[in-house]
Image (tube, rainbow, N blue to C red):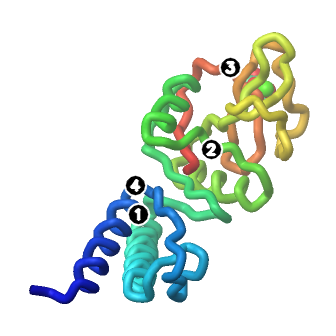
Amino acid sequence: MLPYSSYILIALAALLVTCQAASKCPGISGLPGRDGLKGLPDSLASKRHDALANLKHRLFQLEAVLSLNGKIRKVGEKILASNGKKADFASALQSCEEVGGTLAAPKNEEENKAVMDIVKEHNQYAYLGIRKGETSGQVKYINGMPLSYSNWHQREPNGNGKEKCVEMYPDGTWNDKKCNMYRLTICEF
Ligand code: MAN
Ligand code: CA
């Protein structure tokens, strides 16, 4: 027979494991531990800390390998990657969205340069995740927000309603372009 207190501890541990898995842990008063208000006992808090540290390290390793192999490019919080395929705008966007990303849309000079590096690497113009509104003709991101950064080539955009998509040239400048061309797919995550 285990002492009575052991049963309480086992039950408590089981409860914590279950509620953590469901992300529904109630605050457990009287057991502040070092996790303070969350009320996790020290032993569990430290296990969770170790697990997080391991995950971070593994993620660091994976990103390092993918960067080394030129599979991904990190810029700020974004990760950029191309599948190396040329497609029309709708298909390019679809391939990015299918894997939880979207077409790359540079929001500053640093991001623009990172996308440009991929364009240069593949020696192919790429579609950006930017398009003109169906009726307004206003230039927007895929999510409908208005453009906050641009790097138009001189005398662009000049499409006059006929060019609803945007491509990037190897010098990093942008051109409004018809959406049914075959252009490199570059996604952001
Ligand atoms: C082509 C198209 C246009 C572009 C001009 C620039 O006609 O690619 O989108 O504006 O070239 O000369
Ligand atoms: Ca144009």
- Mark 3 vs mark 2, foreground winner is 2
- Side (left or right) of 138 relative to 90: right
Q: Is 7 placed above or below 89 here?
A: below
Q: Earlier in the sequence, mark 3 or mark 4?
A: 4
Label 3 CA crowd tier, 10 Å (few <14, some 14–19, many 20+): some
Looking at this view, name the residue that lies furthest to the left.
Answer: 1
Q: Are marks 1 and 4 in contact (CB under 8 Å)?
A: yes
Q: Does residue 73 appear left or right of residue 61 in this picture?
A: right
In space, the residues marked 1 and 3 are separated at their CA atoms by 50 Å
User: Is residue 57 something that shows in the picture?
Assistant: no
Which sits earlier in the primary sequence, circle 1 or circle 3?
1
Looking at the image, is mark 3 or mark 4 nearer the viewer?
Answer: 4
**Residue beneath label 4, please?**
22
* Residue at the image position 60 percent from the left and 76 percent from the top: 37
Q: Are marks 3 and 4 in contact (CB under 8 Å)?
A: no
Residue 72's x, y, as percent? 49, 60
- 8 horizontally vs 139: left or right: left
| Residue 123, image x, y percentages | 55, 47
Work out whether mark 1 precedes mark 2 in sequence or the reverse, and give the earlier one.
Answer: 1
Q: Is mark 3 within 8 Å of ligand 1?
A: yes
Q: Which mark is residue 20?
A: 1
Residue 151 appears left or right of 11:
right
Quarter the N terminus occupies: bottom left
Give the camera-side residue of 172 and 114: 114
Q: Is residue 180 visible in this depiction of the protein?
A: yes
What amino acid is at disc 2?
A: Ala
Disc number for residue 178: 3
Q: Which residue is mark 2?
A: 104
